Amino acid sequence: MPIRLPRLRVVQALFVRDALVMRSYWLATAFDLVFGLLSLLIYYFISRTFHNVPVHELGGAPTYFAFAAVGVALALVVQASCVRVAQRIREDLVSGSLETLIAQPLTRTELALGQSTFHFSFGTVRAFLYLLVAFLGLGIGLSQASWAGLILVLLASGLAMTAVGIALSSFVLLLRRAEFLVAMAVLALTLLGGAFFPISVLPDWIEPIAKILPTRFIFGGVRAAVLRGEGWGLDFLYLVIFFAVGLPVAVAFFSFALNQACRRGRLTSY
């Protein structure tokens, strides 16, 4: 049986659907964006409290705020995007929309990508805007930044987290009310990946695990591109490879979870 590539128009249709849903709840979206900016300000004022913090382990960041700003901006996006994909699956289950989608001539890959593409695309743009606010609006220059590197790493980050989001959202199909598991997994990815502190401060038995997490390369790659303007190439390469290997695995797991939900009659269960 020949491999069937996902049809762009199908993924695009689901993308537009989620964009229209978000636009209809514009006030909630606005508050969510403001919450992200407030989080940046909190870390900004925390960093001003500690003026003499050693910076030799902050990945080239001149201050702790410069280090934390990248982590906060990206962590908020990773958390919101992954959890939002799981919530989208849950909403479709409750409303019966998922059963309708499955009845359409869609492949599992098209369905998985369509359910997640908008949220990670929006998240990538959101991260870029947060970084501009953090560095241009809060007194940290971008004279050494590699804009090409930043854009490439952000795009690769969005692709890598798409695979993670699809895999995590599959648990919503296998377990009822599994959003909290997704939220806990994403929290672990952000904390252990080095969003708010260097992974070198982690216990010795956790640090090897943290070093292979995709979020570690997301935070490290963006920091290298923004703060040093170099050294982001290996992080970018890892994220691309992670996406190339992880997406088929994530889609296979999503397909398995969907088949299990169909077999057990859980497509319309609460």
Image (cartoon, rainbow, N blue to C red):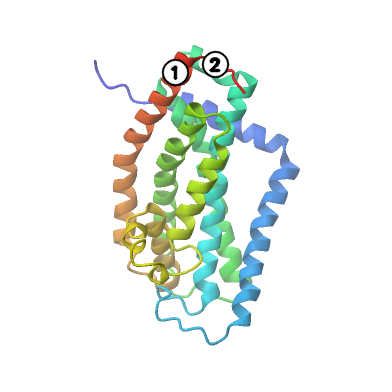
Q: Is residue 124 visible?
A: no
Q: Position of residue 155 (x, y in %)?
A: 43, 50
**Residue at the spot of label 1:** 106
At label 2, which amino acid type do we have? Glu
The quarter holding residue 36 reads bottom right
At label 1, which amino acid type do we have? Leu
Q: SS for tag 2?
A: helix
Residue at x 34%, y 57% (from the top left corner): 209
Q: SS for tag 1?
A: loop
Residue at x 35%, y 63% (from the top left corner): 207
Q: Position of residue 198 (x, y in %)?
A: 43, 69
Vertical comparison of 250 with 61: above or below: above
Farthest residue to the left: give it: 1
Q: Position of residue 237 (x, y in %)?
A: 29, 54
Residue at x 59%, y 25% (from the top left corner): 92
Vertical comparison of 200 with 268: above or below: below
Vertical comparison of 121 with 188: above or below: above
Give the quarter of the figure containing the N terminus.
top left
**Residue at the spot of label 2:** 99
The quarter holding residue 108 reads top left
Residue at x 53%, y 18% (from the top left corner): 266
- Foreground: 128 or 100? 100
Give the quarter of the figure containing the C terminus.
top right
User: Dot 1: within a 10 Å radius of its alpha carbon, few (fewer than 14), some, or many (20 or more) residues?
Assistant: some
Residues marked 1 and 2 touching at CB (< 8 Å): no
